[in-house]
């Protein structure tokens, strides 16, 4: 694991920073995970992250709003819990509008960093978008699911996809 200098979490975007390393969410489902040791009220999960060979679950207290990161090993044995600082920090991988002018379809998708696509879209959704853009067969349901996420992608990365 890392020698932790600081821990930050963007609850709106589900982004976790440990020192200056950014960890994108693998999932961001809400569910009960336990009780806050500070006030005794419920903790709700916000996101799940893979941190090297460990797993991290970010949770927020429903009463005192405390943000916590629970670390588990690869066998899901609990290792430790750390408090997080809330932030509105976002990754700086925006592509300027001038760089995107004239790009559409497959060329637009190719110009987007892979980690940006994986932040919002599932592997199957990404595959469907690329297949559609290339004029190949694709699974309509995956493309439909991806299209529902276009606005969120544009909000986070400033890139508007229209495939």
Image (tube, rainbow, N blue to C red):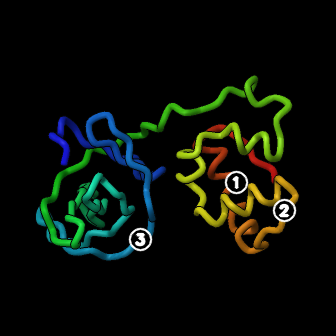
Tell me the residue that label 2 is attached to: 136
Residue 31 location (% of width, % of height): 37, 75
Question: Reading the chain from its start, which is encountered first: label 3 or label 1?
Answer: 3
- Extreme-top residue of the structure: 98
Tell me the residue that label 3 is attached to: 30
Q: Could you tell whether 2 is left or right of 59 in the image? A: left
Q: How many marks?
A: 3
Q: Specify whether residue 59 is in view.
A: no
Tag in front: 2 or 3 = 2
Q: Could you tell whether 4 is left or right of 28 in the image? A: left
Tell me the residue that label 1 is attached to: 150
Q: Could you tell whether 13 is left or right of 58 in the image? A: right
Q: Give 24 or 85, whichever is nearer the viewer.
A: 24
Q: Is residue 98 above or below residue 37?
A: above
Is label 3 in contact with label 1 (beta carbons under 8 Å)?
Answer: no
Q: Quadrant of residue 21?
A: top left
Residue visible at 64% across and 30% down?
95
Q: Specify whether residue 140 is in view.
A: yes
Residue visible at 28% across and 57% down?
65
Q: Is residue 140 above or below residue 12?
A: below
| Circle 3 SS class | loop
Tag in front: 1 or 2 = 2
Residue visible at 79% across and 40% down?
107
Residue 156 location (% of width, % of height): 58, 43
Q: CA distance from mark 2 to mark 3?
A: 36 Å
At label 2, counting other C-alpha atoms closer than 10 Å, the crowd grade (few under 14, some 14-19, many 20 or more) is: few
| Circle 1 SS class | helix
Q: Is residue 19 above or below residue 132?
A: above
- Which quarter of the rendered picture does the C terminus lie within? bottom right
Residue visible at 83% across and 68% down?
137
């Amino acid at each position: 694991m890392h020698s932790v200098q600081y821990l930050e979490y963007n609850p709106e975007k589900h982004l976790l920073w440990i020192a200056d390393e950014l960890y994108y969410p693998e999932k961001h489902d809400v569910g009960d995970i336990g009780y806050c040791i500070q006030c005794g009220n419920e903790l709700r999960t916000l996101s799940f992250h893979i941190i090297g060979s460990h797993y991290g679950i970010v949770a927020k207290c429903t009463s005192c709003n405390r943000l916590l990161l629970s670390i588990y090993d690869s066998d899901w044995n609990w290792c430790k819990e750390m408090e997080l600082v809330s932030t509105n920090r976002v990754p700086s991988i925006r592509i300027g509008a001038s760089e995107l002018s004239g790009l559409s379809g497959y060329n637009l998708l190719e110009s987007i960093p892979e980690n940006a696509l994986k932040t919002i879209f599932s592997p199957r959704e990404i595959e469907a978008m690329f297949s559609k853009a290339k004029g190949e067969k694709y699974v309509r349901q995956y493309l439909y699911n991806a299209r529902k996420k276009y606005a969120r992608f544009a909000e986070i990365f400033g890139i508007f996809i229209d495939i």
